[in-house]
Amino acid sequence: MLVLSRRVDEKIVFPAIGLTVHLLRIKGNVVRIGIDAPPELVVLRQELEKSGVRPQSAATRSGTHEICNRLSKISLGLHLFQKQREAGMLAAADETLARVFSGLEALDRDAVGALVQGGPEKRGDRPARALLVEDDPNERELLAGLLGMNGCDCATAADGIEALDYLASHERPDVVLLDMMMPRCDGPSTLRAIRSQPRLADLKVFCVSGTPPQDLGVATGPGGIDGWYSKPLNPRTLWDAICGSISVSGVKV
């Protein structure tokens, strides 16, 4: 069972399924919770679920049926939690919230299992090499851990300065996963520094950021970012992109 204490404005991230739970506000016995989920996962309030809202694509229903059912139970649990808080049933509400987070933990764990099912993917004589540049230590270690479980040799850097130092002193990685909003040296500055070096000019650089590219003025394509992956992240989509880029670069996937 996952048991957590969180303050207002803190969040709980389940990276394998791309789902984030935000604790937005506590006022009296009412708790306001926000959920960010990728488009293929439908999260419904209880009243919307009763209205018959469902995923539209048959393929999507087939591929995510079990996940949607499990998220539906989680949604009901959150609804019950809020009602219990409003009624002053604080002990019961805490138990309900613990069950909700336990369900989310199990869903996230199962998604990791599906991601790495069958063991690490082999690619010729060596694993894929990635450099993950992310200032949030928790998010950095979670994503690096997921990539490592999938057979990727993933180095990490906390900002652009550390990333450029790594690139100057280590063998060139297959791909750089670059956050945009970082202290000291942000993503756009790091990208410009990479593209200015002939040795790194064609290095694959994928942006992993919650900020849209149009807000930063960063180009996509030659001389810019090779791919843009928004947070909350879908790890399966990112891993497929890494494998595709490595195959194109000549490393057997």
Image (cartoon, grey):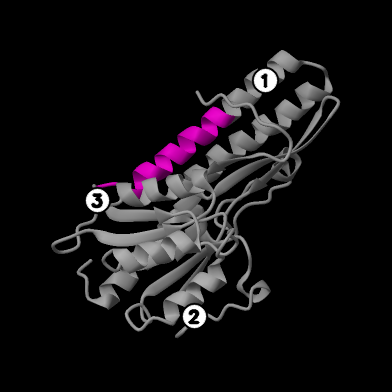
Q: Residue at x 67, y 72 (%)?
A: 215
Reading the image, the residue beneath label 1 is 94
Q: Is residue 46 visible?
A: yes
Q: CA distance from mark 2 to mark 3?
A: 30 Å
**Is 245 displayed left or right of 55 in the figure?**
left
The local crowd at label 1, few if under 14, some if 14 to 19, many if 20 or more residues have their Cα within 10 Å, is: some
Reading the image, the residue beneath label 2 is 224
Reading the image, the residue beneath label 3 is 120
Which one is earlier in the sequence, the residue at label 2 or at label 3? 3
The quarter holding residue 155 reads bottom left
201 relative to 172, above or below? below
Q: Residue at x 49, y 50 (%)?
A: 64
Tell me if label 3 and label 1 are in contact, CB under 8 Å: no
Disc 1 marks a residue whose amino acid type is: Asp
The local crowd at label 3, few if under 14, some if 14 to 19, many if 20 or more residues have their Cα within 10 Å, is: some
- Residue 41 location in percent, x, y? 56, 51
80 relative to 165, above or below? above
- Residue 197 location in percent, x, y? 39, 81
